[in-house]
Image (cartoon, helix red, strand yellow):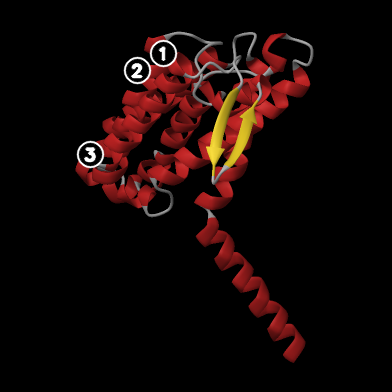
Amino acid sequence: MRAFLAAFLFFVLTVFFTYYFNPAVPHIIQIGGYSITITSFWGYFISSPFNMQTEGNPLYNLLLPAVLIFVLGLYLKNINKAFQRKCNLRAIFIMAIIASYVKSVGSILYYKGYSDFGISLGTSIITLSFLAAFVISLEFYIERKERLDHLYGHFIFAVLSCLIVLLAVLIFFSFFASSSFIVHAMGLTVFLLLFIPYYERSNIKRALSRDERKIVTVARG
């Protein structure tokens, strides 16, 4: 259910910000009796993670990412539960959106003077973030190779390793072998800077606890 809701939310937000929300037109929002005018700049910025006007391909920027989110959600819930204990679908979604906004700030600075205030519009960072999370999630199978070897055999793990490499290559050519290399690299970097500490928070906490115990032991000794 959560996988469907996440995919549906992505689909609705993308359709709304692409086809029904015109960032070039100022919008007036009423909040508690106050009127807030969203200028065209803020319109482009607010809609940037879900607005396909720059990329504009409904198949690659709307349908396939929605399917990816749905499939990843089912995969985490039903197959890779060990990964879900460390990072759930909602956390990935939120961090992907944050990464997309940071990417937009970077693109404003990098593409200053270009059209639309230099803001890069599109769903590519969210898509790239989910792909990165999926690739990282596969480490559980590689980690537990010896434990699961009697169930799947060497062949399955060899195939899985090849698929990981192939997916990494496809991601590279899809997102980085283009003129948008800088903003894609920026968005992925921000996502990983958010994702990895969150993903490894239990290990980081244990490491800090060990250091604290060592400090206390030394102080007492």
Q: Is residue 107 above or below residue 157?
A: above
Give the labeled residue for mark 3. 152
User: How far is the residue under mark 3 from the one under mark 2?
Assistant: 33 Å
Give the labeled residue for mark 2. 63
Viewer-nearest residue: 125 or 20: 20
For residue 37, side relative to residue 68 (left or right): right
Q: Is residue 219 above or below residue 157?
A: below
Q: Quadrant of the C terminus?
A: bottom right
Q: Are marks 1 and 2 in contact (CB under 8 Å)?
A: yes
Q: What amino acid type should be assigned to the residue bearing mark 1?
A: Tyr
Q: Are marks 3 and 2 in contact (CB under 8 Å)?
A: no
The percent position of residue 168, horizontal first and vertical second, equals 48, 23
Q: What amino acid type should be assigned to the residue bearing mark 2?
A: Leu
Give the labeled residue for mark 1. 60
User: How far is the residue under mark 1 from the one under mark 2?
Assistant: 6 Å
Residue shown at 30% from the left, 31% from the top: 70
The percent position of residue 218, horizontal first and vertical second, equals 74, 84
User: How far is the residue under mark 1 from the one under mark 3?
Assistant: 33 Å
Q: Are marks 1 and 3 in contact (CB under 8 Å)?
A: no
Residue shown at 68% from the left, 22% from the top: 41
For residue 219, side relative to residue 211 (left or right): right
Q: Nearer the viewer, mark 3 or mark 2?
A: 2
